Amino acid sequence: MGKIYGEGVPVKPAFPDVGNRKKGVKPNGKGLYLYIHVPFCRSRCSYCNFHSQAFNDTTFAWYYKLLLQEIALWGRRLKRPPLRTIYFGGGTPSLIPLNQLDQIMKTLDKHFVLSEGMEVTLEANPDSAQDVSYFRGLLSIGFNRLSLGMQSVNDRDLQIMGRPHSVGMTMQAYSSARRAGFGNVGLDLIWGLPGQRLKAWLDQLKVVAEMRPEHISSYNLTLESGTVMAKRCGESGDLVLPTDTEQGRMFIYGAEYLESMGYMHYEVSNFARMGFMSVHNSGYWSGSDYLGLGPSAVSTLGKRRFTTPRYMDEYDAYVRGDMVGNDFEELTEKDLLAEMIMLSLRTSRGLDLKDFRERTGYDLVKRHEQLISALHRENLVRINQGRLRLTKNGMLVSNVIIQRLAFGE
């Protein structure tokens, strides 16, 4: 979606209600979902086009100072709102020293309302998170959920992806986190890699499932223009991706295997044991308000979407100039409804048709009767208990279905 920044916006714009703002009141199922982007990595992976830069002490110190200021500015603008979750993503948040993570959490506690037991997640790469003492330190600071960037249990795959860790380092990191006392650990995986076949993928899932993480994120490799991986699979041709048919089998059979091992397939790319679905990510998919801090982070508050500048010099001017919250895209009702369709259909719960009808004044099924009938005949969608859901086959082509239903394309 293109960004249309507001013009003539007041220096201190009015913000929509984001929950109970009375000082000291703890949120009870309400509040913002807070994301902090940490734009630093030791090296760039060959498939990655996210905003990140090489980690060094000088640039990190610059970022760290600005982040603390940005936290204070948003806290003041939003009148110390309650938070429901905190999620440090990136980039590689596990590169941040423990004492500075602790200070960030204390600053959040000062300017926002934090509740005891709220989900607090840190993304970690195995090369930067190894020692039991490190994970104990995270727990003492307040982190209670870990998302570990495993990506593969095959060293060849890791080398192709340009990952800075080995399988052995991943196993060490996972073991250390468990010994430290982490009871909520998620593992991230990528499938559809060059040279990968169905059996190899299922063998990897067997290894991961036997480790018994609480959560598994399983993402299909997407070739982004300009990345090293895209060039190697395109221009140079030295890497060959699995066929579409093979990738389809990997998705379907992989999901069925994880379900047989006790993991709920609750979103297109996410699986969890009972009681361990990501509260933070579920907030995005439900269309709740969320606040993003750090370079390139995005926020949605009511009908306004804010995007933080991505480069450090621009981020510096944005924070030091007290411009936080000044520029935004005003979302139309059409935008919001399209996103409601898009986000809902990614989840196993699907789209609540009654809720949609009450918000729009029209029946989605009747408006797209021929399309939905065709999708149903092809076993791509189903309607059950008033909800339109994608089947597993439908999830495989979810982008196409969502484009047709949400945007009429």
Image (cartoon, rainbow, N blue to C red):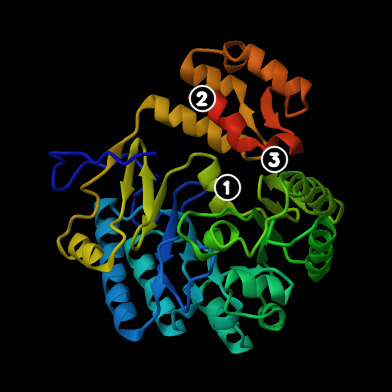
The disc placed on residue 409 is: 2
Compute the Cα span from label 2 to label 1.
27 Å
Could you tell me which secondary element the residue under label 1 belongs to?
helix
**Residue 366 found in image quarter:** top right
Q: Is residue 211 left or right of residue 105?
A: right
The disc placed on residue 143 is: none
The disc placed on residue 282 is: 1
Q: Where's residue 99, x and y in %? A: 42, 84
Q: Where's residue 145, x and y in %? A: 60, 67
Nearest the camera: 36 or 54? 54
Q: Residues within 10 Å of mark 3 (few under 14, many from 20)?
A: some
Nearest the camera: 214 or 26? 214
Compute the Cα span from label 3 to label 2.
18 Å
Q: Which one is earlier in the sequence, the residue at label 1 or at label 3? A: 1
Q: Which residue is mark 3?
A: 396
Q: Name the residue at the front extreme.
A: 236
Q: Where's residue 375, x and y in %? A: 71, 23
Q: Is residue 182 above or below residue 301?
A: below
The residue under the point 16% across, 39% down is 7
Could you tell me which secondary element the residue under label 2 belongs to?
loop
Q: Where's residue 313, x and y in %? A: 22, 67
Task: Tell me if I can see residue 118 in this picture.
Answer: no
The residue under the point 75% across, 45% down is 248
